[in-house]
Image: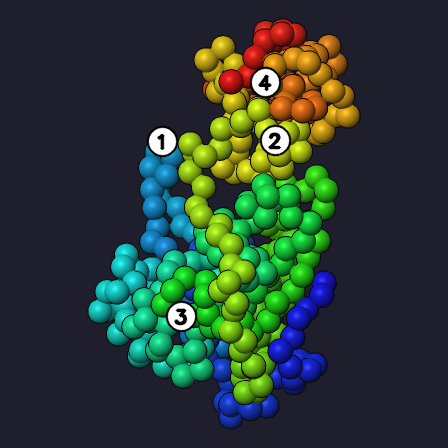
Amino acid sequence: MNIERRTSNPPDRRAGIGHPMKIVFMGTPDFAIPSLKILIENQYKIAAVVTTPDKPQGRGQKVSYSPVKSIALEHNLSVIQPESLKDENFIGQLKSLNPDLIIVVAFRILPREVFTIPKLGSFNLHASLLPKYRGAAPINWAIINGEKETGVTTFFLQEKVDTGNVLLQARLPIKEDETAGELHDRLAEVGAEIVLHTVRLIEMGKAIPKPQDDSIATPAPKIFKDDCKIDWNQSALQVHNFVRGLSPVPCAFTHHNGKLIKIYRTKIVDQVTTAQAGTIVDVTKQLLVATGDEVVEILDLQQEGKRRLSVEEFLRGCHINKGDKFE
């Protein structure tokens, strides 16, 4: 892990603000859990955890709550679940806590009246090397675009999303066949370390925020279902990166005989073919599909209404023939 610091070595804890730092932590999904845990393990005072409201899920509409709430309850932390971040009662609750710092990891966009409450500011952990990949899906887009490296960034919040002054960054190589899910888990762990380093710098008064260079910013917009359809006319490399960049969620898909097939994992095969893009060129022991230049092998997939299968299992039970087309 290569941490880019805006100062020298991380300072010793709690040498600067004169009292134990009081933190409000805001987050929702699994990505935020390592960051919350590392703060708890290092005995920081978490005044409250803010997360999304509980939601009914599944056929039985059983109420479920966020992964971050689960961790908060395990550690007997106070949990706040506002419907609206502009709600006056919620803002009043935060002000009454008198926090030194708000830390945001995979939450919602905070209004100014919230992120300006803490004495020492509010910072966010973002899963890219800002200003690259500003937006909701930085991990997915980094892989889809074939990046060889990414990382995490902490930055002070400003009104415009993902544009605040950078505190710390850590770089991480993207492995050749790594999926978004696998990279997500590695970045969450590295991100937790960066969150801890950032807190230590802020409480010592030694954080040196650095403005982002807007001229080299790139977008990472939210990905919707319609964005996940595979274009077989692209190169084998582009198709491969697209599949792994959307795996396991929201997941790349194609159609065969009118049925949707999700594709979770592929491999590029060094084989040139004259078959039209999307044509299945082998179904003996492999499932090979023609692209705009070479061939990709599908390794892991799920047919509509079925469970996820390895290609070996899929080929044993699915009526699919050489010459068929994925569309």
The kind of residue on which mark 3 rests is Gln
The kind of residue on which mark 2 rests is Val
Residue at (72, 42) in percent of width and height: 176
Q: CA distance from mark 2 to mark 1?
A: 35 Å
What residue is pinned by disc 4? 278
What residue is pinned by disc 3? 158
How packed mark 3 is, by other alpha carbons closer than 10 Å (few <14, some 14-19, many 20 or more), is some
Residue 71 shows up from this direction: no
Q: Mark 2 or mark 1: which comes first in sequence?
A: 1
Looking at the rendered structure, which numbered label has been put on residue 212? none
Q: CA distance from mark 1 to mark 4?
A: 36 Å
Q: Is residue 11 above or below residue 273?
A: below
How many labels sit on residues? 4
What residue is pinned by disc 2? 239
What residue is pinned by disc 1? 59
Judging depth in this view, the residue of 89 and 149 nearest the camera is: 149
x and y, in percent, of residue 40 in the image: 55, 70
Residues at circles 4 and 2 in contact by the CB criterion of under 8 Å? no
Q: Residue furthest right?
A: 270
Residues at circles 4 and 3 in contact by the CB criterion of under 8 Å? no
Residue at (36, 31) in percent of width and height: 59
Helix, strand or loop at label 2? It is helix
x and y, in percent, of residue 188 in the image: 59, 57
The kind of residue on which mark 4 rests is Gly
